[in-house]
Amino acid sequence: MKTNDVLLRNVTKVVVFIIFLFSLHLFLAGHYNPGGGFVAGLISAGAVTLTLIAYDSQTVRSMLNINTIMMTGVGLLFAVGTGMIGILTGDPFLTHKFGHVDLPILGDTSLHTATIFDLGVYLVVVGVTLTIIQTIGESD
């Protein structure tokens, strides 16, 4: 029996957007403040889980159209790849590298390998969490 969840679905559309914005904030603030890829990934997975509660799994799968196992693999490649940069330059594994680049709109911007590592962690956390949630949800 399908229930009428009009209120939940309409609220979810707004709340999920706000959750993803907060996740982006935590991801970007994680280098200098508490947060980072792990926390942002958990919050993003929570937003998708809320969407799964409001809609069914087939609807969410068609909205996202993401292979979560592939997302996990790409995240692992990013995380391990940034660690290998240190080894390739003669430093220990996961040695932090950074530099400054003059971007057209943003001006002088510092780029860090820690951000790429955090992106890898984010992708792994979201991919694994969503794989687990979808596996549990499909068992019904």
Image (spheres, helix red, strand yellow):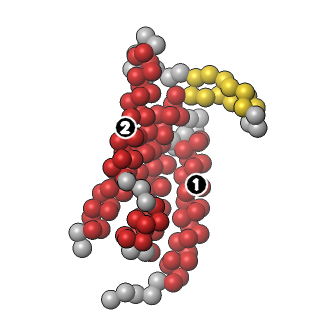
104 or 132, nearer to the observer: 104
Name the disc covering residue 22, or none. 1
Assign a secondary structure to mark 2.
Answer: helix
**Which mark sits nearer the N-terminus, 2 or 1?**
1
Q: Quadrant of the N terminus?
A: bottom left
14 or 106, nearer to the observer: 106
Q: Position of residue 132 (x, y in %)?
A: 30, 57
At 55% from the left edge and 60% from the top edge, which residue is drawn? 19
Residue farthest to the top, as pictured: 90
At 39% from the left edge and 34% from the top edge, which residue is drawn? 77
Image check: 135 left or right of 117?
Answer: left
At 56% from the left edge and 28% from the top edge, which residue is drawn? 112
15 or 135, nearer to the observer: 135
- Residue 21, located in which quarter of the rendered image? bottom right
Check contact, mark 2 vs mark 1: CB within 8 A.
no
Image check: 9 left or right of 107?
Answer: left
138 in relation to 44, above or below: below
Name the disc covering residue 45, or none. none
Which residue carries the number 2 mark? Answer: 76
How many neighbours does mark 1 have within 10 angstroms: few (below 14), some (14-19), or many (20 or more)? some
Q: Position of residue 93 (x, y in %)?
A: 39, 20
At 40% from the left edge and 22% from the top edge, which residue is drawn? 84
Q: Position of residue 133 (x, y in %)?
A: 32, 61
Q: Quadrant of the C terminus?
A: bottom left
Amino acid type shown at disc 2: Leu
Residue farthest to the left, as pictured: 139
